[in-house]
Image (cartoon, rainbow, N blue to C red):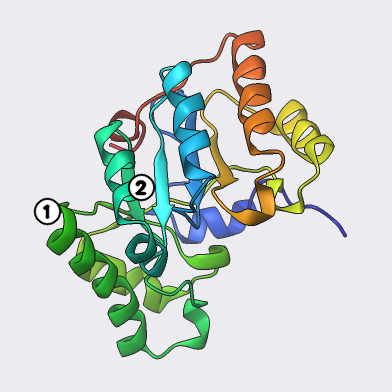
Amino acid sequence: MKYKYNPPTIIKKIFRSFYWNTVNNKILLTFDDGPISNITADILNILSKHKIKAIFFCVGENILRNISLTGEIIKEGHSIGNHTFNHQVLLNLTDYQKLKQIQKFNTLMLEKFNYQVKYFRPPHGKFDFTTKKALEKLKLKNVMWSLLTYDYKNNLELVKFAVKNFLTNNSIIVLHDSIKSKDIIKDSIEFIVDEVKRNNFTFGEPEECLK
């Protein structure tokens, strides 16, 4: 497999309104697919230890399974992002189905937590122009990435290679709050923290990184 850590420049140019990097030369940590019992709590503990604020791009059905855990994410001062309700690939859906997947998530967050969602990330990073139109209609910021760690491969050496070679001072980093990465997620975060310090970079908070 040929790993792609940073999306192609041509795609970034076509979809200029999407966030591929931070705007303030600080690093933003993001976590996809949670919340997950016995994993999310470990992530929260490490982030608290290092005083890092992140975006958790959650799946609606996972929120319903873990209501209290979702509340903890918010209580700890992190942001909740929309990763659709059922984690379906948007390219396989009609325009109406796309909107429903996104709106159902936002409605859930409003009803359960009185939380207004600002950020979105498409499942598997797959989108098209109709996705862009849907997000503009719903006034959501689409947050992509500049550093995919491949932590879901459950191989810490892959993560280390990605971070050592592709970390920049304005990286948006993707990690996973999931069963696939549970064995290495704590070590992955700690390694990233060490590399950020070694390079004299700093972590930023979602609001400042995505103005």
Q: Position of residue 202 (x, y in %)?
A: 49, 16
Q: 8 or 94: nearer the eye?
A: 94
**The label number, if any, that marks residue 114 in the structure image:** 1
> What amino acid does circle 2 point to?
Leu
Residue positioned 41% across, 18% down in the render: 51
Instruction: Name which residue lies at 39% across and 42% down.
Output: 55
Disc 2 and disc 1 in contact, CB within 8 angstroms: no
The one nearer the camera, 133 or 195, is 195
| Relative image position of residue 163 (x, y in whole percent) | 71, 31
Q: Amino acid at mark 1?
A: Asn
Residue under label 2, please give it.
Answer: 69
121 to 23, vertically: above or below: below
Name the spot of residue 170 as percent of width and height, x first: 51, 29
Helix, strand or loop for disc 2? helix
Q: Residue at x 35, y 60 (%)?
A: 63
Quick check: 124 above or below 167? below
Taking 102 as reference, is 11 left or right?
right
Judged from this view, the residue extending furthest toward the right is 1
Q: Position of 200 compared to 82: left or right? A: right
Q: From the viewer's perspective, is the residue at label 2 or at label 1 nearer? A: 2
Towards the viewer: 50 or 64? 64
Q: Position of residue 84 (x, y in %)?
A: 39, 69
Tell me the element at label 1: loop
Q: Residue at x 49, y 71 (%)?
A: 127
Mark yes or no: residue 21 visible.
no
